[in-house]
Image: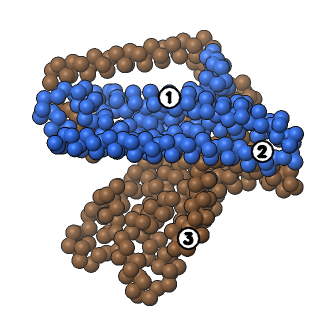
């Protein structure tokens, strides 16, 4: 009991740190990924190649290598960031490649007929994107984006090995009370399950809401 | 596919559109150029553009040490993969069992391993197991958590593969009087594994990248050795850039292999004469096309 009284506040703090890392990294990933996906569908060969280069290079290097480069390598090159910023930066840039692929295939999954119909009606490309393509594409992106979010949550554990006291890093801090280690690991595991489960369930709910709204739209359109 | 992409949203660009795209390209290139220039100035100021640090890492004593690390990375990835492969098949079969309890347990295992980070499992092996008197060698501290996690990933891949085999295959095998295990072993799995071969290679790429977690348990694979050499030579930046490039090259080669294999499998399916496929129902060809068309 005494152990729990001292450990729980620390674990709770670690839980919050994991959430902060996740929110920071995933937001950055959304921005970078969407920008890269846009570049990859524009009719400009150079931009397409740049987008593809970003995805191919970053995705094929282990995240831990990227993080270590940011933490140990960059300061040597005269670019020092706070530890937390390094983590968010590395994880965001890494997850951004996955977001890019999700967004791109979401957009490409839109039925050509819809786009052609919109063009025949004389809509401009920004209008087509805003009114036709993105609403449809977004529904196809919810589940894959949730998967990216969940792997981002799990990847924040790597920060623990580099000195951030989040849900995984706290394990080594609490290891002194070895008698209670099993309990500690149990709580930490449950912590992760809670976060990932919440993410997965909310994505499911969002999907249902979007589907419902979309089916309303179609009836209005045909009426 | 790749060639039809632009046609989805854009016609062939007119003069105005071309001008706009050119402007956008130049703007973004300028932005990136400024970033690169800034980085180069910073690197130059700190002496990272000189040849010595790079050559120190790239020349024999250090580079052979690092290459041995790459070998150990590949080896640990292969071993974890070899361990996870058969167990993944077993787990996939359990996951599709007709017994509800068995199916439920398999599902739980998969769901839980997929929502807990490998690193936490690693710390569990590293910190908890010794406390109850079980010292796990460093090598297994890396392999065990990786295998436990990738078993689940592989099981899901195999399940997708098995589900892509048309039910007629199983029904035909049952009609022939084969027992369930024989059906899997001789009819379903050979086809399913073929379907998922490219996914298996991609999963191995993930596994290979995950072996970099050896850094955490100080198993002397590529990344750990990179850190050792970086600290020793004092060229941390150069070392980690080179380590990253090595991972990149290996992964790109593997990914290219996956793509080539995928193309070849598709070509085999598409190349088979249509009549033969529908009439004789050549097991591999017929089964595979259906899934590919739907996915």
User: In the visual, does B140 lie left or right of B165?
Assistant: right
Colour that chain B carries in the picture: brown
Q: Secondary structure at mark 1?
A: helix
Q: What SS does tag 2 mark?
A: helix
Q: Is residue B182 left or right of residue B108?
A: left
Label 3 is found on which chain of the structure?
Answer: B
- Quarter containing the C terminus of chain A: top left
- In percent of width and height, residue B84 lies at 61, 60
Q: Secondary structure at mark 3?
A: helix
On whether disc 1 and disc 3 are found on a single subunit, the reply is no
Badge 1 is on which residue? Answer: A27
Picture quadrant where residue A113 is located: top left
> Disc 1 sits on a residue from what chain?
A
Closer to the camera, A27 or B236? A27
Counting residues from the start of the chain, the first of labels 1 and 2 encountered is 1
Report the mark closest to the observer, 1 or 2: 2
Instruction: Identify the residue position indicated by label 3 in the image.
Output: B100
Is mark 1 in CB contact (under 8 Å) with mark 3? no
Residue under the image location 35 percent in, 76 percent down: B168
Q: Is residue B226 visible?
A: no
Subunit of label 2: A
- x 56%, y 27%: residue: A24
Is B147 drawn above or below residue A151 in the view shown?
A: below
* Quadrant (top left, top right, bottom left, bottom right) of the N terminus of chain A: top right
- The answer to whether residue B201 is visible is yes
Q: CA distance from mark 2 to mark 3?
A: 32 Å
**Residue B29, image x, y percentages:** 37, 19
Q: Residue at x 47, y 79 (%)?
A: B183
Q: CA distance from mark 1 to mark 3?
A: 40 Å
Q: Which residue is mark 2?
A: A184
């Amino acid at each position: 009991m005494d152990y729990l009284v001292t450990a729980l506040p620390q674990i709770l703090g670690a839980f919050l740190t994991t959430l902060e890392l996740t929110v920071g990294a995933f937001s950055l990933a959304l921005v970078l990924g969407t920008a890269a996906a846009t570049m990859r569908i524009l009719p400009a060969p150079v931009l397409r190649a740049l987008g593809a280069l970003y995805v191919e290079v970053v995705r094929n290097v282990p995240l831990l290598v990227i993080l270590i480069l940011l933490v140990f390598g960059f300061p040597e090159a005269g670019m020092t960031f706070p530890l937390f910023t390094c983590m968010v930066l590395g994880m965001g840039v890494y997850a951004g490649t996955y977001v890019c692929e999700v967004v791109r295939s979401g957009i490409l999954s839109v039925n050509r007929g819809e786009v052609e119909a919109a063009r025949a009606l004389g809509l401009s490309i920004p209008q087509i994107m805003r009114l036709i393509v993105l609403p449809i594409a977004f529904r196809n992106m919810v589940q894959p984006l949730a998967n990216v979010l969940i792997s981002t949550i799990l990847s924040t554990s790597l920060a623990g090995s580099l000195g951030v006291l989040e849900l995984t890093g706290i394990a080594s801090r609490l290891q002194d009370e070895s008698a209670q280690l099993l309990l500690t690991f149990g709580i930490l595991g449950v912590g992760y399950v809670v976060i990932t489960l919440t993410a997965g369930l909310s994505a499911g709910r969002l999907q249902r809401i979007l589907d419902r709204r979309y089916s309303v739209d179609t009836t209005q359109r045909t009426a | 596919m790749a060639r039809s992409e632009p046609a989805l949203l854009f016609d062939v660009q007119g003069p105005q559109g071309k001008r706009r795209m050119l402007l956008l390209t130049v703007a973004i290139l300028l932005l990136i150029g400024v970033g690169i220039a800034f980085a180069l100035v910073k690197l130059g100021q700190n002496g990272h553009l000189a040849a010595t640090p790079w050559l120190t890492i790239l020349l024999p004593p250090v580079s052979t040490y690092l290459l041995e690390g790459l070998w150990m990375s590949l080896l640990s990835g292969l071993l974890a993969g070899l361990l996870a492969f058969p167990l993944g098949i077993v787990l996939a079969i359990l996951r599709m069992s007709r017994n509800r309890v068995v199916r439920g347990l398999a599902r739980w295992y998969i769901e839980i391993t997929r929502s807990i980070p490998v690193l936490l499992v690693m710390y569990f092996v590293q910190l908890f197991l010794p406390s109850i008197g079980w010292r796990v060698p460093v090598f297994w501290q890396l392999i065990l958590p990786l295998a436990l996690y990738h078993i689940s990933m592989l099981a899901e891949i195999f399940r997708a593969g098995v589900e892509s085999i048309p039910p007629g295959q199983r029904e035909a095998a049952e009609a022939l009087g084969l027992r369930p295990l024989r059906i899997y072993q001789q009819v379903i799995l050979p086809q399913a594994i073929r379907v998922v071969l490219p996914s298996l290679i991609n999963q191995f790429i993930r596994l290979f990248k995950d072996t970099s977690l050896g850094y955490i348990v100080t198993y002397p694979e590529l990344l750990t050795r990179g850190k050792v050499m970086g600290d020793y030579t004092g060229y941390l930046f150069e070392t980690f850039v080179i380590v990253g490039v090595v991972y990149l090259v290996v992964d790109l080669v593997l990914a290219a292999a996956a793509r080539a294999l995928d193309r070849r499998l598709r070509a085999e399916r598409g190349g088979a004469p249509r009549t033969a496929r529908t009439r004789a129902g050549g097991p591999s060809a017929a089964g595979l096309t259906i899934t590919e068309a739907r996915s």
